[in-house]
Image (cartoon, grey):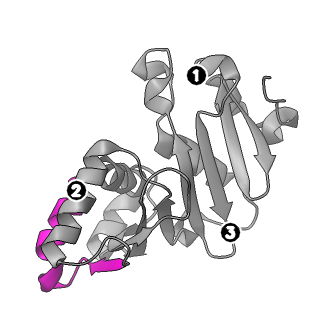
Amino acid sequence: MKAEKYPDAWNNNYLKDKGYWLSYSGDRYYVYTDYYDDGDDAVDIIGIDTYNNIISVYASYNGWEEREDEDRLKLRDIQMELWDIQPDVKRADLEAIRRIGIVNKPTVRQIEKVYAAVGKAKDQTLIFDSDDTNDEEEWALLANTPFYGGTKKLLDEYKVGKSIARIIIRPTTQVFGDHDMEFRFSQAHPSLAWSMKK
């Protein structure tokens, strides 16, 4: 049964013009398009937490949409559109993005390499900081994932004025995947923040 369209999606013409509509349940937005599973299943499931200033991605299948790449939105575009429609928050307020229940194979492989590199069991939480020289090997592995790249592009393209400062890997509570990955942000270097304003 096709999901009922959220009434006017807050008059969100940006998503609507691109062929998407929303429903909302609990703390999650369900994003639909007729180009993914004929609109029967959500192409993205995204949580927006404006108390802790975190975006959580529970599912994302934008690459499976049956249309040309230039006609569909990237996940980061949808994430920031949902953030921007929230009252009383700015882009600079965003503190972290979480990927919940990771099943993306390249990312899963890199996470496995990280656990092997630190000699920890996979049921333990790992924390890596960008300015810790002891974390350079693990950081490089995690930076070589589509989720890191997509998050960095989001921060850059939407001029959030922050950079990825910490990566947290923790066991997931979801049915699918073994781990969650969280990217926490810090204020960008002043020269970078200035260039983003140009």
Quick one: label 3, few (<14), some, or many (20+) residues within 10 Å? Answer: some
Mark 2 to mark 3: distance in Å?
Answer: 30 Å
* Image location (x, y in percent) of residue 128: 28, 78
Say whether disc 3 or disc 1 marks the residue closer to the N-terminus. 1
Say whether disc 2 or disc 1 marks the residue closer to the N-terminus. 1
Residue at (73% x, 67% y) in the render: 88
Name the amino acid, label 2. Gln
Quick one: label 2, few (<14), some, or many (20+) residues within 10 Å? Answer: some
Residue at (62% x, 45% y) in the render: 45
Front residue of 195 and 61: 61
Left or right: residue 109 versus residue 6 is left
Q: Secondary structure at mark 3?
A: loop
- Choose mark 3 or mark 1, whichever is in front: 1
Label pair 2/3, CB-CB below 8 angstroms: no
Q: Which residue is mark 3?
A: 50
Say whether disc 2 or disc 3 marks the residue closer to the N-terminus. 3
Q: Which residue is mark 2?
A: 110
Q: Secondary structure at mark 2?
A: helix
The boundaries of the magenta stretch are 126-145
Decide: is 73 above or below 153.
Answer: above
Q: Is residue 129 magenta?
A: yes
Quadrant location of the C terminus? bottom left
Observer able to see residue 150: yes
Front residue of 51 and 98: 98
